[in-house]
Image: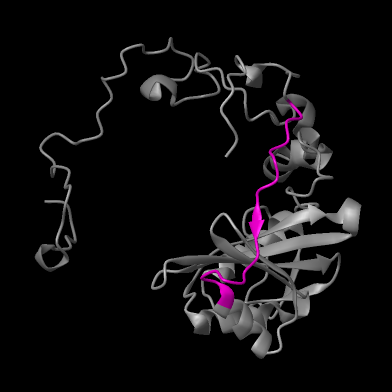
Amino acid sequence: MRTYKDKNNAQKKQYYDNRFYVSPMIEREDTNGTIFEEEVKFLRRNDIEILDGYVELEQLVVIVNSEQNLKTLELLKNFGYEQLSEVAAIDFLAVSGGYEVFYQLLSVSQNKRARVKCFVKQGKMLKSVSEIYKSANWAEREMYDMSGVFISGHPNLKRLIMPDDWHSHPLLKSYPLQGDEFAAWYEVDKIFGRERRDEIGAENRDPAFIDEKDTFNFSRIFHETANGDSPNENKILQEYQEDGGVKFVKKIKRNQSEILKERP
């Protein structure tokens, strides 16, 4: 983690002094003589070609061929890494013509963490690991949706966040930060039609800007102020508990609960 530096509201400025600050390289340790030595030997005994392996931030990092991602994760799960907590891809298309995909593993029983990395060329298929870790199902769909990594053997490979007909993938470094014309007019064209573009206008593509005093476009600012009315400065008037209703429950026991078919 980098040292905190006060940037004096740098998010409001276009440029600031340490905009191009790069964190120093994290020290890497050889796996020999560490608690991860057996994992590396176990993978090599099972014909896994480890391109590189080291310990970083007290966790194991192994880099393998993309063709062996499924077998590698299967072996590590048998070794005790029972949880897959994250799957993601990093865009290196401009530099290397592909993606760096990583799998973050956790062994609760052994209190260990491991990261498996592999490089996938653009347009090549990466084997799905959802048959080993159920958590990979949606994670792989998100990776395909946001980064464009193709997954073979996935039970339902389709977009997860963006619409099915969305153009390109938003986490690519080549994707415009403010979106393109397709993104600016997508909802207007879908809901109202292209003929009403002049009447409605393009979408606001700056998610960092919200005017909390604007009660025309943000109806729930200041506790559900009516559309166009002056903001309600008294922020404690809003009630979410019905009069005479059931009190909010902090703790509930399943064997003492009852499902009501109608309101009493």
- Which residue is located at x 55 percent, y 72 percent? 36
Rendered position, 25 above or below 86: above
Q: Is residue 250 magenta?
A: no
Say above or below: 165 vs 105. above
> Residue placed at 53% from the left, 58% from the top?
58
Q: Residue at x 70, y 31 (%)?
A: 205
Q: Residue lying furthest front in this view?
A: 33
Is residue 159 visible in the rendered image? The answer is: no
- Decide which of 142, 89 is in the foreground and name it: 89
Pick the front one: 166 or 191 = 166
Identify the image quadrant of residue 256.
Answer: bottom left
Left or right: residue 128 compared with residue 172: left
Magenta residues? 19-37
Q: Residue at x 13, y 41 (%)?
A: 245
Q: Nearer the viewer, residue 50 or 127?
A: 50
How far across and down, in percent of the image, does residue 20 sit? 76, 29
Q: Which quadrant of the structure image shows residue 201?
A: top right
x and y percent of residue 81 in the render? Answer: 49, 75
Total marks shown come to 0
Membership of 29 in magenta stretch? yes
Q: x, y percentage for residue 215?
A: 49, 17
**Up-down relation of residue 19 to residue 91 (above or below):** above
Our reading of the magenta stretch's main secondary structure is: loop
Horizontally, residue 111 falls left or right of residue 61, namely: left
Give the color scheme: rainbow, by chain, secondary structure or one colour: one colour
Q: Is residue 42 above or below residue 106?
A: below
Q: Is residue 45 visible?
A: yes
